[in-house]
Amino acid sequence: MNSERLETGKGKIRSLNRRGTRSDKSPPVVRHSRRYKDPSICERCGSIYTAKTWRSGRSLTPEMIEQAVWTICPACEQLDEGQYFGRVSLSGAYLVANLDAIRARIANVERRARFTQPERRLVATDFDGKSLEVLTSSQKLAHRIAREIEKAFGGTVRYAWSDSDGMLTATWSREK
Ligand SMILES: [Zn+2]
């Protein structure tokens, strides 16, 4: 009796491991070009895929939830992999003095962007005491943040595309 139970336990663990291994080995390209069933729901962020787009804040009928496939949306996959395509680098004495207000404004831009298009979101922010670095999952979001900061706080912005990886870097600074 005891050994039987033990075997069942081991078998379960083994099958879980195998499943984990298989999903880890599937190439990223395949995962990204995967087609989603309509409707799908992201089990991380609650975004809903229907009519070929991912949106957050969509409402679902109980019938749709029953039909929906639970999955991980492209944005959440991207976060897992730490991929980013845009960068906003902010610096200057004004930044340090108004850090909270500037951070709040950035968070606000992201929230609005996420509502219309969950693929656009921040990946990481880092403040080293002098400059604030924001990495975004899309170039468009990096541009939007930089433009919004310039509009709200003045200062100057420069944009540069890197040849090697196509990443957009927006550099904003304001001294006084
Ligand atoms: Zn998601």
Image: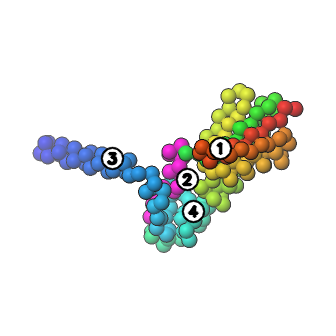
- Quadrant of the drawing holding the C terminus: top right
Separation of residues labelled 1 and 2 (CA atoms): 22 Å
Tell which circle, 4 or 1, labels the residue nearer the N-terminal end.
Answer: 4
For residue 75, the mark is: 2
Give the SS element for disc 4. Answer: strand
Give the SS element for disc 3. Answer: helix
Tell which circle, 2 or 3, labels the residue nearer the N-terminal end.
Answer: 3
Look at the image and say whether residue 17 sits in the magenta stretch.
Answer: no
Tell which circle, 1 or 2, labels the residue nearer the N-terminal end.
Answer: 2
Separation of residues labelled 2 and 3 (CA atoms): 22 Å
Q: Pointer 4: what residue?
A: 54
Looking at this view, is 145 or 143 the one in front? 143
Tell which circle, 4 or 3, labels the residue nearer the N-terminal end.
Answer: 3
Separation of residues labelled 3 and 1 (CA atoms): 35 Å
Magenta residues (range):
68-82
Question: Horizontal placement of 19 versus 86: left or right?
Answer: left
Tell which circle, 3 or 1, labels the residue nearer the N-terminal end.
Answer: 3
Q: Nearer the viewer, mark 1 or mark 2?
A: 1
Contact flag, marks 4 and 2 (Cβ < 8 Å): yes
Tell which circle, 4 or 2, labels the residue nearer the N-terminal end.
Answer: 4
Residue at (26, 49) in percent of width and height: 15
Separation of residues labelled 4 and 3 (CA atoms): 28 Å
Q: Residues within 10 Å of mark 3 (few under 14, many from 20)?
A: few
Q: Pointer 1: what residue?
A: 162
Q: Nearer the viewer, mark 4 or mark 1?
A: 1
User: Cβ(mark 2) to ligand 1 < 8 Å?
Assistant: yes
